[in-house]
Image: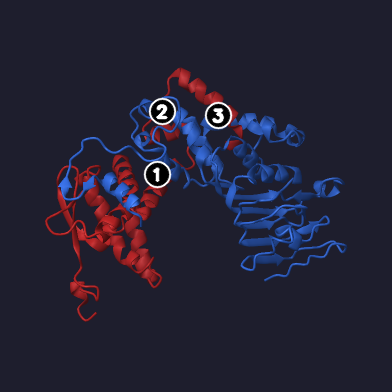
Amino acid sequence: MAAPESGDGNNGAARMVTLISSDNTRFEVEAAAASLSQTLQLTILDGGGGGGDGIPLPNVDSATLSKVLEYCIKHAPAAANGGAPNATAVDRAELERFDNEFVNIDQSVLYSLIMAAHNLEIEGLQSLVAKKVADMIKGKSPMEIRRTLGFPDPTPEEQAEMNAHMLEYGWAYE
Amino acid sequence: MGGGIREKFRSSLCISGGNRRQPQTPPPSPDHAAGGDEGSGGTEGPDLLSALPDDVLILILGFLPSAAAAARTSVLSHRWRLLWTQLPVLLFVYPEKPLENAGVVAARTSARSLHGRRRRARMRGLRSSHSAPADPLLRAGAALAGHAAPEIRLLAIADIAADPDDADAVLLAAAPRLTGSLVLLFRFRVLEWIGATDVDAIELPCFEKAENIELNLAYLGLALPPSGVFDRLTALRLKKVQFQGPCNLGDAVSCNSWHPLPETMKLSLERTQTPSAHRTHARTR
């Protein structure tokens, strides 16, 4: 604890692991950050990902992976404290600010992110993005939701079907 | 952690010992894959969101403020029609912020025009409530009729007032599937219903799989099931409840003597009233 800078705690030097994106970019991160992924955690506990070996992530491209890791690195210290029971209000506010900024991105990136978080089982990131997408839907009419989510405008037949459907679901509208 | 599970993770990451493979096709999305809808998946059009697997979309719907808001997304496509019905959490809270858009006027109007008929329609039960108007309790009834998930982890209804018949119907519909928490909160008891001579109490069916039940009935009556076991219940919280009928509380939570009230169960009673003939025997722990 004398040298907080180095990150060398009682558990030995901060272990690094290498992750390899689908487009073959290598990312070296602390094992603690990568372990926010339940999926990776198992591999890392098994001793994988160190040295010259990397962990290939064939479903995650480098742009998405770097974003995912940005999240993991930011959240790793709090996660290491077991959900941060002794985090200060300042720390929590800072994380919240980070989260808000973090999801302030293009929809296509959001969807890549939630898919990656889903595959890698990063619960916090999944929820964060899901909440963001839900906020985009919230309080909107069906047409607005369609446009927001990038659905094509309905054909007249589809419109008629939508209207009939909304009548059937009257209970959900008043 | 069993080797099988680890293998599964390995294969989902395409890790096989030291060998690195570069598969071009992603592994199949877990669980729901095509969602069981006719030809769903690739037929959704170019929107990116629909490329996500069902369980991710269901997760997103779970962050909407109410089950009704989630159900409204079913208008998007055939696939979305099924998604909200798999939600594990169903929230019905009044007042939900109303939609301000002209696009839903037709649906709302159709609901309004039924308003006068509502009370009579209530007695006909949930099957006819598809197009009934939507206070939270009625919404819950209509939603449960269309909801298809095998498990409900949370059913929460907060309403201004309740018609006991409506509440009974909702509770009956939910009881077999509720595996988590039931929260039912009312703010007022409506005088009209106090005057009713026959039904003035909500009948609590046996929630065999529920873990947590919290009721605030604004002094409506509560009739506990004469038989049945709340096997999984770990917390029971009753507020502003008038107990009705012959069953005492100790019996209700353990109606069979060989099923004693679990020592670990938290029981909380607040401002409950018991008709003089029927004292509760259970103590607040």
Q: Which type of secondary structure does the marked residue at label 3 adopt?
A: helix
Do callouts 1 and 2 mark residues in contact (Cβ within 8 Å)? no
For mark 1, what is the residue? A133
The residue carrying mark 2 is B40
- How are the colours assigned in the image? by chain
Chain displayed in red? A
The type of residue carrying mark 1 is Val
**Chain of the residue under the numbered disc 3 shown in the image:** A
Residue type indicated by callout 2: Ser
The residue singled out by tag 3 in the image is A166
Instruction: Check whether the beta carbons of the residues at disc 1 and disc 3 lie within 8 A of each other.
Output: no
Nearer the N terminus, badge 1 or badge 3? Answer: 1
Q: Is residue B85 above or below residue B90?
A: above
Which chain contains the residue that carries disc 2? B
Q: Residue at x 62, y 58 (%)?
A: B233
Q: Describe residue B190's horizontal placement relative to residue B127 as left or right.
A: right
- Residue B39, quarter of the rendered image: top left
* Distance of label 1 from label 3 (alpha carbons): 22 Å
Judge from the rendering whether residue A121 lies leftward or rightward of residue B68; answer left or right.
left
Residue B84, how many percent across, how many down?
50, 38
**Three-letter amino acid code at the position of disc 3:** Met
Name which residue lies at 75% across and 50% down: B202
Chain letter, colour blue: B
Residue neighbourhood size for the residue with mark 2, other residues' Cα within 10 Å, grouped as few (<14), some (14–19), many (≥20): some
- Image location (x, y in percent) of residue A29: 20, 59
Q: Secondary structure at mark 1?
A: helix
Q: Is residue B77 visible?
A: no
